[in-house]
Image (tube, coloured by chain):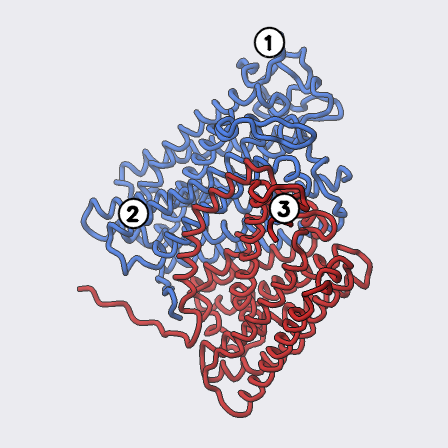
Amino acid sequence: MMNSELWLAQIQFYLSLGFMSLFLVTELGLAWVLLFFKIGAHRSAGAAWTAAYRFWVRVFALAFILTFASSMPVLIQFGSLWPSLMNRIGEIAGPLLAAAIFSTFIFKSCFLGAMLFGHRHLSERVHTFIVFMVAVGVTISALWLVILQSWMQTPAGGSISDGQYRVTDWTGVIFNPSVGWYAGLLMLTSVLTVAFLLAGVSAIQSLHRPVGEGERLVFRTALIMGVTGVILQGLVGAGAGQALAPHQPAKAAATAAYWHSDSKPELLVFAWPDSATKSNRAAVALPYEASRWLGRDARGAPRGLDQFSGMSPPVAVTFWSFRIAVYIWILMAVVSVVSFFRARRHQFDPGGLSRGWRWILTGMTFSGWAMCLAGMSHTFFGLYPYAVNGTVTISEISGNVQGDVLLGGIVVHVLFYLVFLAGFFQLLGHIERYGVVPVARRRGRA
Amino acid sequence: MIGSLAASLGFSANDPSFWMPLVFMGLFFAIIVAGTVLDGFDIGVGCLALIAPRDLSPRMLSLLSPWRDANEFWLFLGMGLFVAAFPNAWGSIMGRLYIPLCVLGLGVLLRSVSFELRLRAPVEMQSRWLTGFGVGSVMTALAHGFLLGELVVTYQTQPSYLWFSFFVGACVLAAYCLIGAAWLIMREGGELRARAVMWGRHAVRWTAAGSVGVSVVLAFANAGIFLKWSDGPQWPVVVALWVAILICFVSIEMCLQRMINQSYRTTALPFMLTLVIFLITLGGLGYSFFPYLVLDNITIWDAAASVSSLRLVLSATIIALPVALIFNIWVYRGMFGLSKPLTPPEYKP
């Protein structure tokens, strides 16, 4: 495939994967938050926690169906855009994909129907247990995908012989060097996504009318989740950057826009990397030591982009996707901490905050999605030109679809995704304003 | 027979690298049959909902709702099993079919999302999501047919083969509409049944054309398959199958014709006959393809992953299989006969 066709194929695949991930992080966080609401309903009298549960289970159901449905184009494009990939890594990706699909099947078929439509038929304890099982199932399915994705970033436990990967050690494959970091980043991204979603919706509800006890509890949960989430996300993000730099030195060098190995590495807050002149324009740097974020060579000196003979990711995309994620994190940190301390004075009633601040919170509702997309761009585009780090390149696994066909495919996919996003936002706006009307589905009766 | 098959490939019959791909092929075929029939009536009702009158189409989708979550999973299961058990054929098959696979993926996505969003949408938006469900069903049906056509002629790209694939696409759309209409006849009376009879009558001819066309082209486009069917002791079976298909089509036609003029009683006959036709056609396709995944090119043993990997997938399948069987039996047992109405929830003081 030509270079531009390769890029179009990548853009299409990551577009679909990104759309699926938006709703994956939402459903992952919401599943655990719903369990928290149900446990709260058990522990306290009154219907406030149950009201919170009933509102947010609607959003969870929408996110679940959108994740599940949009995983079909991802699976299909996995085969039609990258046909030779399974020839190379089939031994490893096959069982992992099977595990993900089967665990989704088991937990979805056994528990999701009862959770969404069986509340009135089951006792409270049984229903809470089912909510717990759904949360466990969503987490397990997501973790299998994280294992596969992190294995492609740091392949371990396998050996490649005449083009095909063979497994030497499944423990090494599953517990590869980056799985913990990527799993932690995914979990914390979903915590932050859901925290700001909850806070934003509660804020806009309070702008329309005085909120009830349920919304107040939701707002409190959201702010506590937000504050703890940003602290942990900062720690895990920093740890991941330093821990993965030795495994992915080209990505680390591109993230730092460290062009020449003999120059001093800088922590750049803002710059425009120019690959033609191999320099950074308008660079604004922090006066701190940057070499721990970079991969080292045999003598311990940091490796710049000139050491990879062209097998390095696109610098501008890698550089900026990482920084956009960090800027969003900083914004989230400021907003969540300030909101927490301001709302604390009003017992977490969102109506106690000023109208301007509540509009800010509303504007931040989908900041978790932006952080998820920025992080995923950094993860995936930073691996270029490899599909599996260090061994399998993207150009060798790609098929031969024409460029204009790919472009048409991208346009059509974007149109469909915009329609579904519009539908999701419209429903969210509707229930925010008018509340939730339960829907019924009976097994075997119509 | 199994022993001779194993010996001809150079394996012993107890060798896991022989029987494990066979087991997965059997499972994959079972999923294809179940998915075609069960997702088939779902797709068919969706396609028909586009041409149904406004007051009937919401009822049609409500009839589907008890089985929606089970129906949507078959394609997923099939693809997942295929990618896990036969990774070396995955790329060869899917890499050449970008456009029809795009249409399939987007159609399935549109169907799933439209159904669930319609259920939860305010009344003003529900008709739009219903149209979306119908459009998604049509896209899915056309994509299924196109993929079947491409598979049968082994991805030839000449224009005449392209027209054949479009033809098979239209016929598969008609086949799904037939099974959907037959299912509706069985489920609900009144105006819906009368209309379903009309839809079924229009669909039967195209379904028959497609069924015959696919079988004939498969036999003539591939000499190996022609030999497999025409060799030796097969003749009575082949004749019996063609006669059975003919009888089924004629019976469906007669039953529907009668229902237009005489009675609107509930009858499972068209649905059962359509099931038989589907089973015979799919069985014939499966027998023709075995043991190839890509005709004359890749067999299931070429495409299968290594034994250790297959062992893992098999253990996952063994865990999932009882869940799948119990769940599907529990879900689908109310699928036949008249639809049972909803009952109001019990009052709990």
Q: Reply above or below: A7 against A283.
A: below
In the rendered image, residues at marks 3 and 2 fall on the same chain = no
Q: Nearer the viewer, mark 1 or mark 2?
A: 2
Is the residue marked by circle 3 packed among few (<14), some (14-19), or many (20+) residues within 10 Å?
A: some
Q: Quadrant of the C terminus of chain B?
A: bottom left
In the rendered image, residues at marks 1 and 2 fall on the same chain = yes
Residue A112 x, y percent position in the rendering: 39, 53
Look at 67% across and 22% down and name the residue there: A280
Chain letter for the residue marked with disc 3 in the picture: B
Can you tell which mark lies on residue A129? 2
Q: Nearer the viewer, mark 1 or mark 3?
A: 3
Name the residue that disc number 3 marks. B6
- The residue type indicated by label 1 comes to Gly
In the rendered image, residues at marks 1 and 3 fall on the same chain = no
Does any portion of residue A149 appear in the rendered image? yes
Label 1 residue SS: loop
| Closest to the observer, B119 or B44 | B44
Q: Chain A appears what colour? A: blue
Q: Chain B appears what colour? A: red
- The residue type indicated by label 2 comes to Phe
The residue positioned farthest toward the bottom in the image shown: B262
